[in-house]
Amino acid sequence: MSRQVYFEDVDVGDELPTLRLTLASEEVRRYALATRMPGPRFMSDAAARAEGLPGQIVPGNMSMALFSRLISDWCPEASPVRLSCTFRGLVHPGQPLILRGVITEKHASDHGNFIECDLILENEEGERRVTGTATLLLPSGG
């Protein structure tokens, strides 16, 4: 069980714990069906190749969901205010993925205690496939 993270516990430059995972083809297919993603490119390698792609791809919103998982694994109490992504390359199931985050800003106001994070999803070769930023509301420890 992880300890609760409070606004006072974090500093600019702190890194979120790295998340490493490999998505299975079937996971991607189930996600695409559940979210009603159009296009066969999310269903199988053969269907994606028929569309001219090198193989099955992970939906962009699934990559964004992985960023949300990175954040919630680190701090379940964090309330996301904003999450944005830039898709820089295709993400394929069956390839090891590494997700990282770093705190880039920290500010308190009458509206709450906020941090800004830079987020990266890369493959094992270090190629950045998705980059993003997040604004999170963190609880105060007192």
Image: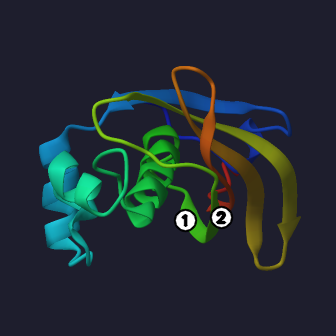
Determine whether, in the image, residue 62 is placed left or right of residue 9: left
Which element is circle 1 on?
Answer: strand
- Residue at the location (64% across, 42% down)? 120
Q: Which residue is mark 2?
A: 137
Mark 2 burial class by Cα count in 10 Å: few <14, some 14-19, many 20+? many
The one nearer the camera, 46 or 94, is 46
What coloring was used for the rendering? Answer: rainbow
* Contact, mark 2 vs mark 1 (Cβ under 8 Å): yes
Amino acid type at image mark 2: Leu
Residue 114 image offset from top left, x and y in percent: 75, 62
**Image position of 111 with respect to 10: above or below:** below
- Mark 2 or mark 1: name the one nearer the start of the chain: 1
Amino acid type at image mark 1: Ser
Determine whether, in the image, residue 64 is placed left or right of residue 43: right
Total label count?
A: 2
Res 44 seen here: no
**Extreme-top residue of the structure:** 125
Quarter the N terminus occupies: top left
The one nearer the camera, 135 or 139, is 135
Residue 118 image offset from top left, x and y in percent: 73, 48
Q: Quadrant of residue 40?
A: bottom left
Separation of marks 2 and 1 at Cα, in angstroms: 5 Å
Residue 87 image offset from top left, x and y in percent: 60, 58
**Image position of 104 with respect to 110: above or below:** above
Determine whether, in the image, residue 46 is placed left or right of residue 76: left
**Image position of 48 with respect to 3: above or below:** below
Determine whether, in the image, residue 115 is placed left or right of residue 61: right
The one nearer the camera, 60 or 48, is 48
- Residue at the location (76% across, 56% down)? 115
Q: Which residue is mark 1?
A: 79
